[in-house]
Amino acid sequence: MAGATRDPVDGFALGTMLLLCAIWGAQQVAIKLAAPDVVPIMQVALRSGLSAALVALLVWRRGERHSFLAGTLRPGALAGTLFAAEFLFIAEGLRHTSASHMAVFLYTSPVFTALGLAWRLPAERLRPRQWLGVAVAFGGIAVAFAGGSPHGGAGPRMLLGDALGILAGAAWGATTVVIRCSSLSEAPPAQTLLYQLVGGFVLLLGYAAATGQAGQVRLTSVAWASLLFQGVVVSFASYLAWFWLLRRYLASRLSVFSFMTPLFGVSFGVLLLDEPVSVPFGIGAAMVLAGILVVSGAGVLRRIEPRPAAR
């Protein structure tokens, strides 16, 4: 089942990925905005708990409870652990680096995804031209990062935060590989997501308690807005959409489009956190878009046509 055929990216997938990238690009900014009231590790733990409750309700309403016994427990537990690791690295990284830096380094994940899938699934291997596109897009992210903080150097704390961002990207990439190469590949998206959210909530809350951060919560209006956005829009709605896409389209092609997310992240940082933008950011943005076009090429353009709404 893990080797089931997937469709190339078409216009519907492209539009959906644009919306998802905008949502994901805003999440680091939301965490940073609410950090004075709720420490990042508690934000990601609480949002995982809220989203898990919503997904559990959805699973119950759909009558999918018995599917959890269909050989998905072991890969589900692994996916949940990797999900928790990803957001642990994000939360701890945001204590040391900026939202713009985190947005850039987190979305190195397509590189790790492509490497893992190329090793495990022949159907997911990228051609040399597509690998060149990945390299160009990754170079664009590096250039955009270089223009993200023109007024300060990278001290040890920021370098630590940046390194944690890369580890978060690796954990996200590994999660995608686990999903595609296991029985979760054909499991209902809500089930796959619930495994991750429950794992994230339990492990992240445990980490917060062990490190003395569990009590650092002050539920102001900003904190509530951030938690609801992260819990309902990001961790619930957008992740369900992402897993649905993974079941239908080639994961390596979809992952390349997530290179757009750092551009949204830096843009939201400018609007909401007053982060400066320099010429290198514009150059990096152009490189990212060029890399995406090289990877997807004319195949995507040929497939940009109306698609019936999903049931």
Image (cartoon, helix red, strand yellow):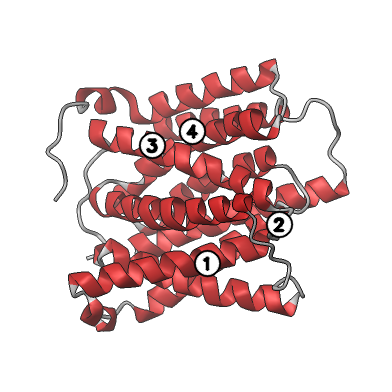
CA gap between label 2 and label 4 equals: 29 Å
The picture places residue 89, in percent across and down from the top left corner, at: 65, 59
Q: Is residue 284 above or below residue 95?
A: above
Q: Amino acid at mark 1?
A: Leu
In the rendered view, does 31 fall on the left or right side of 181? right
| Front disc: 2 or 4 | 2
Where residue 106 sits: x, y (%)?
A: 59, 47
Precedes in sequence: disc 1 or disc 3: 3
Badge 3 element: helix
- Residue 272 lies, with reference to residue 236, above or below; the image says above
The part of the image, by quadrant, that contains residue 14 is top left
- The answer to which of 178 and 242 lies nearer the viewer is 242
Residue at the disc numbered 2: 37
Per the image, label 2 sits on a secondary structure element best described as: loop
Nearer the observer: mark 3 or 2; the answer is 2
Q: Read off the residue under disc 1.
A: 82
